[in-house]
Image (cartoon, rainbow, N blue to C red):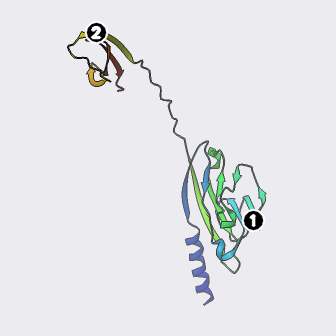
């Protein structure tokens, strides 16, 4: 019977110790998630370590906390940005670097035998995409034309629009009319041409 218990215990340890992968971008903050039910257990002690979790505590501890207060932090780059009192004990690595890649383990010490919450993460670092600044290298061209028309009836026109293409440019024509004296009418045309990006 004792052998059967050890067998199931070893299987349980293997199942709970599998690694899930987290992708981090070089130079960015990366968060390794870990949480527990703080409503059921209250604020508990926990630790984060490098490498697979041992049978108790953490190996190569990078951060540990007791009663909601951080007791040990290997580097100021290791931060708890979640609400620890709500059970969010996720580890955030600030300004992640290539050397941060690898295995991490989170252990929340839940009272009782074999009750600890164990989370193993494998951090994979990738190069962050470089965003090229978008610059628009064009200058809109405009041309103006005025004409004086003689009409038999005075008219006032606010304006109308027309769009056309000239070569690779999109042009928009706006026509303004203004009554200057009866029966003459001043009409002004403006063409605005903008290159279409390829």
* In front of the other: 130 or 123: 130
Residue 83 lies in what quarter of the image?
Answer: bottom right
Which residue is located at x 66 percent, y 66 percent? 86
* Quarter of the figure with the C terminus: top left
Residue 152 in the image: state x and y as whole percent. Answer: 20, 13
> From mark 2 to mark 1, how far is it between C-alphas?
80 Å
Residue 192 lies in what quarter of the image?
Answer: top left
Which residue is located at x 71 percent, y 62 percent? 59
* In front of the other: 58 or 31: 31
Position of residue 17 in the picture relative to residue 168 (left or right): right
* Quarter of the figure with the N terminus: bottom right
Residue 79 in the image: state x and y as whole percent. Answer: 70, 54
Q: Secondary structure at mark 2?
A: strand
Residue denoted by label 1? 68
- Disc sitting over residue 1 in the figure: none
Q: Is residue 12 above or below residue 81?
A: below
Residue denoted by label 2? 147
Which residue is located at x 50 percent, y 30 percent? 133
Residue 96 in the image: state x and y as whole percent. Answer: 63, 46
Residue 163 lies in what quarter of the image?
Answer: top left
Residue 118 in the image: state x and y as whole percent. Answer: 63, 69
* In front of the other: 99 or 116: 116
Q: Residues within 10 Å of mark 2 (few under 14, many from 20)?
A: few
Q: Is residue 3 above or below residue 128?
A: below
User: Closer to the observer: label 2 or label 1?
Assistant: 2
Q: Is residue 181 visible?
A: yes
């Amino acid at each position: 019977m004792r052998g059967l218990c050890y067998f199931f215990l070893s299987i349980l340890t293997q199942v709970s110790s599998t690694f899930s992968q987290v992708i981090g971008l070089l130079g960015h903050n990366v968060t390794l998630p870990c949480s527990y039910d703080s409503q059921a257990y209250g604020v508990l002690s926990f630790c984060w370590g490098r490498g697979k979790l041992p049978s108790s505590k953490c190996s190569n501890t990078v951060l540990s906390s007791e009663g909601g207060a951080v007791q040990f932090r290997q580097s100021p780059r290791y931060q708890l940005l979640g609400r620890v009192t709500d059970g969010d004990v996720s580890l955030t690595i600030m300004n992640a670097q290539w050397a941060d890649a690898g295995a991490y383990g989170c252990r929340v010490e839940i009272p009782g035998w074999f009750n600890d919450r164990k989370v193993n993460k494998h951090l994979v670092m990738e190069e962050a995409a470089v965003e090229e600044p978008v610059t628009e290298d064009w200058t809109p061209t405009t041309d103006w034309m005025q004409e004086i028309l003689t009409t038999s009836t005075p008219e006032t026109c606010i304006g109308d629009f027309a769009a056309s293409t000239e070569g690779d440019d999109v042009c928009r024509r706006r026509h303004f009319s203004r009554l200057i004296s009866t029966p003459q009418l001043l009409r002004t045309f403006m063409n605005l041409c903008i290159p279409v990006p390829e």
